[in-house]
Every structure is written in structure tokens, then in C-alpha cells.
Amino acid sequence: MEFKQNLMKQVGNYLIKLGDQLGSGRFGTVYSGYHKTHRVPLAIKQISIKVPSNELENLNIIIEDELDRMKPLFTNEHIVKIIDKAISVNNLYLISEYCEGDSLEMIKNQDLKINEILKIMKQTVETMAFAHAHKTIHRDLKPDNILFHNEIVKISDFGLVDLVEKEETKKKIISKKGCPIYMAPELFYDQQFDEKCDVWSLGIIFYELIYKRLPWNGKSATDLFDNNIQKMKLRFPKNEYDDEGIKDLIGKMLKVERKERISLEDVMEHEVFQRNLKTKKNRKIN
């Protein structure tokens, strides 16, 4: 066991702690690591690829161009910054800044106060508006990639869906399709989509934080969408946050028909996020 904890892997100028897995999901596994010289903690995502060695350089150029396109996003303190990359025949490694706090997935079932939930959602919504203004749609927003660092929200995995689904990389980067609980219907059905697919994901997350359960469930992805989301009316359980404003907002965010769904601009302007948050200090999220 001690050996596994100390097992290291060198990739370019970086050392990966294979015994310190930070998370895993649709696009691969995240480990802690550091630059072999500077030793500053980093998060390193390992993504499987399948590409002949003679095509590595071309893939490297495509990835470099995509990361250059994303650079304006990384000026936002609420977006996890990708600072470098490395590539081998079997794996792509994205080196990102390290977040010291937990993910939203790890704390979503804790006794979060309404003020804390609204603070998390407000920061997340504002960050997504910034990304959309820079022509970037997330398409894989979920509690796993909403992180915390120094008590602020940090959103990770921006641009990964775009990278995986680019025509030049579609058959080279291996993406294991994860659970579609937070996926907008138009994405599941391969229909036309826009920024409102992120609004849907935010609505599912908001509902889950308030009611400690998902609005719909299913035995499979097809069951979830065909037999539940498409056929079952959205219901709001009674709880201590029986707030008509919150129910109104979530209901508008979770319209199955994309054209009926509220825009992100209207989410930001909804009275729920225009309320004055109480100044009472919230407990630290970590």
C-alpha cells in the first residue's frame, strides 16, 4: 500500500502521484502532481487517446490551438486554468491549477444553508455567463466539476467536450460517456443546441442543492429521458426552502423544449439572484 501511495509517473516536466487520485469522470482521471522543478501542487488530468505515433504532432498542434482559443477564459478567477499539456501515444495530460477545497459533488448533501446555496449558484451562473460571452459552452456541467478554492467557486473541464468532438480529434480522443443526469435533452437527442444546454444543467444542480434529490431519475439514459423527463411533470417537494421564487426560476430553467427555456441572462436577472444576500458569515466550504 505504501508503494502505491508513493508511485510516481513522469510526463514531460511533470510528476504525477498515481496514488493520489483527485477524481475521475467522463474525460479521464485526475491526479495530484507537480512540476519536477517548482514542486507547486497541480491537478493533472489523464485522458486516453488512440493515435499512431506519426500523427502525434498533428494532434499536438490541434490541442495547442484549442488551448490558445480558451486562454481568454482563464483570466476569470472562477475558471480552473489549464497551464500546460503533455501528450504520448496513449494519453493526453492536461495540467491545471490545483483547487484545495472539495467539489460540489462532495458537499451537495451536506446541510447547506439557503444563503450558501444561492452564493454558490450565483458565482456559477455569473461564471457561465462570462464563458458564453467568450463563445464557449460547457456542455458537461455537473457537481463534479464545480470545485472550491479559497472559498470561491472554480469550474473545471471547460472546452473538453469541444476538443473531444472536433472533427480532427473525434476518433483519436477516447471519451467514456458518463451518466447523463445533468445533460440537456437536446444534447441527449443530438438536436440543435445553444447556450441554453448549460442553463438546463444549472437548473438540475440548483434543484438538487435545494431538495437533496434529483428532479427525475431512470434505470438507464433512455428511461431517464423518454419515460421520465419527457412524460413526468417537474415536481417540487415540500421542504424548509419552500420558496415560490426559487420554484419559479428552477421551473423556467428546466423547460424540456429549448426554445421555452429561460436564457442565462434572464436567470441572472431573476429576483432570486437580485435579493440581498444576508451579510451573516457562512461557514467555510472546503
Image (cartoon, rainbow, N blue to C red):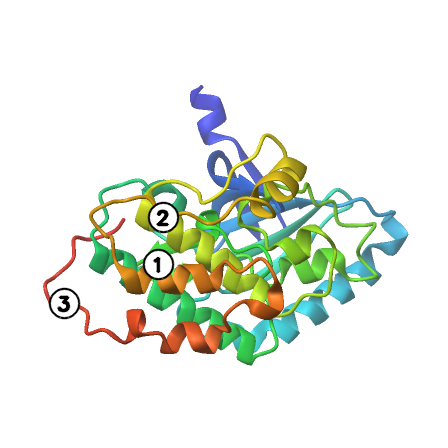
Label 3 and label 1: CA atoms lie apart by 20 Å
For disc 2, the marked residue is 236
Q: Is residue 222 visible?
A: yes
Residue found at x 87% / y 55% = 55
Mark 2 Cα shell of 10 Å, populated few (<14), some (14-19), many (≥20)? some
The percent coordinates of residue 122 (x first, y second) are 34, 67
> What's the residue type where badge 1 is placed?
Lys
Mark 1 Cα shell of 10 Å, populated few (<14), some (14-19), many (≥20)? some
Residue found at x 57% / y 41% = 228
Label 2 and label 1: CA atoms lie apart by 7 Å
The percent coordinates of residue 247 (x first, y second) are 35, 58
The percent coordinates of residue 61 (x first, y second) are 77, 66
Q: Nearer the viewer, residue 90 or 257?
A: 257
Q: Is residue 155 visible?
A: no
Whichever of callouts 2 and 1 sits on the residue coming sooner in the sequence is 2
Label 3 and label 2: CA atoms lie apart by 25 Å
Tell me: 227 left or right of 215. right
Tell me: 126 left or right of 198. left
> What's the residue type where badge 3 is placed?
Lys
| SS category of the residue bearing label 3 | loop
Mark 3 Cα shell of 10 Å, populated few (<14), some (14-19), many (≥20)? few
Residue 278 is tagged as 3
| SS category of the residue bearing label 2 | loop
Which of the two marks, 3 or 2, is nearer to us in this view? 2
Whichever of callouts 3 and 1 sits on the residue coming sooner in the sequence is 1
For disc 1, the marked residue is 247
> What's the residue type where badge 2 is placed?
Phe
